[in-house]
Amino acid sequence: MTKNNSIAILLLSCPDRKGLVSEFSYFVFSNGGNITDLDEHVDIEEKVFFIRIAWDMKEFKIPSDKLNDAFTPLANKFNADWKINFSHVKPNLAIFVSKYDHCLQEVLWRHQIGEFKADISVVISNHPELETLANHYNIPFHYFPITKDNKAEQEQSEIQLLRELEIDAIVLARYMQILSNEFVAEFPNRIINIHHSFLPAFIGGNPYKQAYERGVKIIGATSHFVSEKLDEGPIIAQDIIHISHKDSTKDLVRKGRDLERLVLAKAIHYYLEHRVLVSGGKTIIFT
Amino acid sequence: MTKNNSIAILLLSCPDRKGLVSEFSYFVFSNGGNITDLDEHVDIEEKVFFIRIAWDMKEFKIPSDKLNDAFTPLANKFNADWKINFSHVKPNLAIFVSKYDHCLQEVLWRHQIGEFKADISVVISNHPELETLANHYNIPFHYFPITKDNKAEQEQSEIQLLRELEIDAIVLARYMQILSNEFVAEFPNRIINIHHSFLPAFIGGNPYKQAYERGVKIIGATSHFVSEKLDEGPIIAQDIIHISHKDSTKDLVRKGRDLERLVLAKAIHYYLEHRVLVSGGKTIIFT
Amino acid sequence: MTKNNSIAILLLSCPDRKGLVSEFSYFVFSNGGNITDLDEHVDIEEKVFFIRIAWDMKEFKIPSDKLNDAFTPLANKFNADWKINFSHVKPNLAIFVSKYDHCLQEVLWRHQIGEFKADISVVISNHPELETLANHYNIPFHYFPITKDNKAEQEQSEIQLLRELEIDAIVLARYMQILSNEFVAEFPNRIINIHHSFLPAFIGGNPYKQAYERGVKIIGATSHFVSEKLDEGPIIAQDIIHISHKDSTKDLVRKGRDLERLVLAKAIHYYLEHRVLVSGGKTIIFT
Amino acid sequence: MTKNNSIAILLLSCPDRKGLVSEFSYFVFSNGGNITDLDEHVDIEEKVFFIRIAWDMKEFKIPSDKLNDAFTPLANKFNADWKINFSHVKPNLAIFVSKYDHCLQEVLWRHQIGEFKADISVVISNHPELETLANHYNIPFHYFPITKDNKAEQEQSEIQLLRELEIDAIVLARYMQILSNEFVAEFPNRIINIHHSFLPAFIGGNPYKQAYERGVKIIGATSHFVSEKLDEGPIIAQDIIHISHKDSTKDLVRKGRDLERLVLAKAIHYYLEHRVLVSGGKTIIFT
């Protein structure tokens, strides 16, 4: 994809007031852009306006490298948080894993068949086992063993690598280490985790065992951005399946794998299509 | 609800071209309207643009009774099909039933508790049995027995009654008569039916029996606008539930009732909130 | 239904050992019974055996009023907890409500059309509003206003009434009072509640508000037996629906009503068909 | 798994009569077997009895290689169709594919991580593209190009290969050729297909295009045994997802892939656990 047939995607939030849709759509129109998709949302209680506009750059008068400058005055007028992405610029991902392969397998396979418009520059793991899988998909693999003693140091090495690789976002594909607040602060709302329960139920370790012991009739999976508080970050996607008394903890693990794969993939898909905004600990997903 | 705190809702479709969102949103903004909800869709293949805009009339400069005239020039410029509805004007419904009570019960109960922003002016039936139920909810009931010989005549009487009552839309709440093409033509895309299968599977009579005999593992329900061809009108809402070999036809009927009620209610809800556009035998549902 | 074409339904649990299915099915067969349905489950970890056997009483040699005596020796041999119910004996229900009508409406309507094989002897409420609805379905209504001061006393009056009416089980159809442990102890695993969240998430009051604030992408409903600990009793049925950032708390309440109605109805259905066993704080549901 | 800790699994159907559960469970018990799972079903209309019994062979007095002989008299007494499988004997599968890789990838990955208790002896394709994928999982790949002229001949070669490999069942993982009736007759109720629609809707080619054009709000996938009539064999598993007007045919293909993978995997899982019986063009699935 060249710049000429690229799509520009604006994600923006600002205090709500009259005329915002008109102003932003007029900016696109008056510069020759053809809006291909527009969705907006107003949080009535918080009085915040959110919008996603996608437009064709083909006959747009402002070149993509001048667009930020050109849009800044309008954004400032409304005191907006905003970002413009382009479909010809692929986000650059790092995948973190431990020993379970199902989420990594799913992400790399979808990437390979072209479902994910992203570069995957590295797989990082605290265990060596999944190097073969990463290699099969031609993705570099870095092994950072983590102990209680070396954790802070290893995280610094990881951050340095991620910076060198110019990573935009991190996917935790069943990464079994808790990231430090320092690490999380480096990638605010840019670390996507998959938790194997319908949060906020069964926070923390071994949610399938917790689910089995509670005797629930559904199990779930939740993909969310990582925040400082464990399993309390903004939720991007959730789904569940029905289970019964016949399902052992082992069955839940097996059935849950399918959920985890699909829910994580859905969250990544939303993220890569620039459909996710975060506000007040929650997400707006423009579907 | 008075006119002053009313919401105006524009539903519009027209040939796609650049600048449409900007033009329509500017119309609202420049006249003092505050857009509370905007959603649009472009059918790339057919090159048709669809939009739904909802705005607050409170400080809008054009009074609601002058709005059609004021909007016409802009609509004509883009060769648009359009309609503006107001939240202070409730659509006026007629419900058609036969002997099964579950859909009628559901519709009248939801209406009673205020879920449906509509007037229900009449329940019409080809059987007398459900008069008591209609009366319980204080809705007039008209009995039009239908035989092969009197069908055309009775339909004319029904149409006359519906005209007198100024009915906007008809809900077929498991009405077991096939409406003539003449009748359907009186209410294009304004008759909402519930069919007890996941269309296009199991068209026609006894879909639960058909489902049982085919041995499917899911059954469904479909709410659609009635068109001239049986069960082939534009689909508004569908849902399914899982079944097993243990379910007899009778079980399917029982389980299906819940589906029928909810799917029909969902379709009515979309319709009453002016979220449905029809194009090329399909619906656009602005959710 | 007369005794002659009745179905006997055995629900039994006992320590697991070899030959249990054979022994219990032989008891039925050797006495002339035709098994119409048999399902069993073994909790491997706890080494407990569960079985449900339904058989036709038509040619069964033991009359229904002698069956308990006849079965006791075999049950004792395996140290079993058990109960035999008959399809010609309808369980006798009391429904508790407060002000929300949707669950009461659903239960009474399903009862009226014959879905629930039960007698409903009384509707009890701490508010007077739903008397009209109970009357519409010809069910006696008792109003027991509850204050902090009179709660213990009123519960005693309720218990006395329930005893007089020979109530088998209680359905809490959105009853907004917490029952005392004394009350619950009178009806162990015989009080069916509907909680408007996917437990164990959002225990306690206002779960829809909690869900809205957490920003979940699904909401749920849970029907469970009431135990001494609030919202921690054995779960009978659960389901969820998907929501989005567009849904206000009010939307969640509206969408949740449909879930609550269906999940509660499902739990009651299982209970009335004698498909529910409780063990270790969890349920076995023989579907 | 050795023979000693094997599980025997009886699948049986016969004309319904009294005492069948008792007779078959007594056979197991009296020979020292411990029943770990028993499920039965009676087709009331057709008066046919179906049962699945699983028992532990550890202390069973009849060795596995004598079991068929030992059971035959009892089976003959009730004129039964039956088969006894053992958990230590893995079914031997062949996978047929064309160019789409998602179903093959899913099946081979699940096999690799141990979800499928089966041997996969060969991948057969009418195209060469997926050899690399088969090789990655160390499964032999055979390429049988099919033209109008060589089809009958190539099918004979395939049958010969399948016989040599002693294949028990065939999985069509999006195999885009229609098998001849002669081929199908070789593997009655032992060819598992995945069709990318909720059958019986959208039989035949291009179901996603058909779905798009009809404007349905759900799409589905169906796994079924292949019979002589196209897409009309006994259904094993079905599921659906919700779609909207925003989804192009391409989106349906993408979203449908996830459905196809999961529904096919579910059907294979049931088959490999010997949970599927076929009768009258329908399946009984003992879950």
Image (spheres, coloured by chain):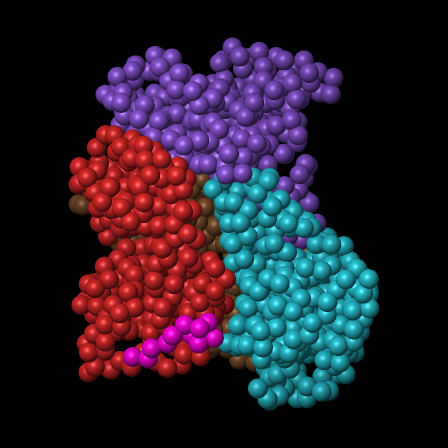
Chain colours: A brown, B cyan, C red, D purple
Read off the magenta span.
Answer: C134-144
Residue B225 x, y percent position in the rendering: 69, 61
User: Looking at the image, which residue is at 43% across and 20% down?
Assistant: D77
Against A20, residue B50 (above or below) is above
Q: Is residue D285 left or right of residue B146?
A: left
Q: Quadrant of residue C128?
A: bottom left
Image: D237 above or below A220: above
Q: Residue at x 61, y 68 (%)?
A: B129
**Is residue B178 found left or right of A174 in the rendered image?**
right
Q: Examine the structure image and report whether residue C135 is included in the region drawn in magenta.
A: yes
Residue C234 x, y percent position in the rendering: 28, 55
Residue C251 horizontal side relative to residue B179, left or right: left
Count of marks, rendered view: 0
Residue C203 position within the rendered picture, expressed as x and y whole percent measured from the top left: 29, 64
Q: Nearer the viewer, residue B48 or C111?
A: C111
Q: Residue at x 38, y 43 (%)?
A: C57
Q: Quadrant of residue A255?
A: top left
* Nearest to the observer: residue C90 or residue B40: C90
Q: Is residue B205 visible?
A: yes
In the depicted structure, whether residue D118 falls above or below residue D258: above
The residue lying at 44 percent from left, 18 percent from top is: D76
D182 versus C278 height, above or below: above
Q: Nearer the viewer, residue A151 or D126?
A: D126
Quadrant placement of the C terminus of chain A? bottom right
Task: Judge whether residue A213 is colored magenta.
Answer: no
Residue D268 visible, this orientation: no
Q: Is residue A16 left or right of residue C95?
A: right
Q: Position of residue B53 (x, y in %)?
A: 63, 73
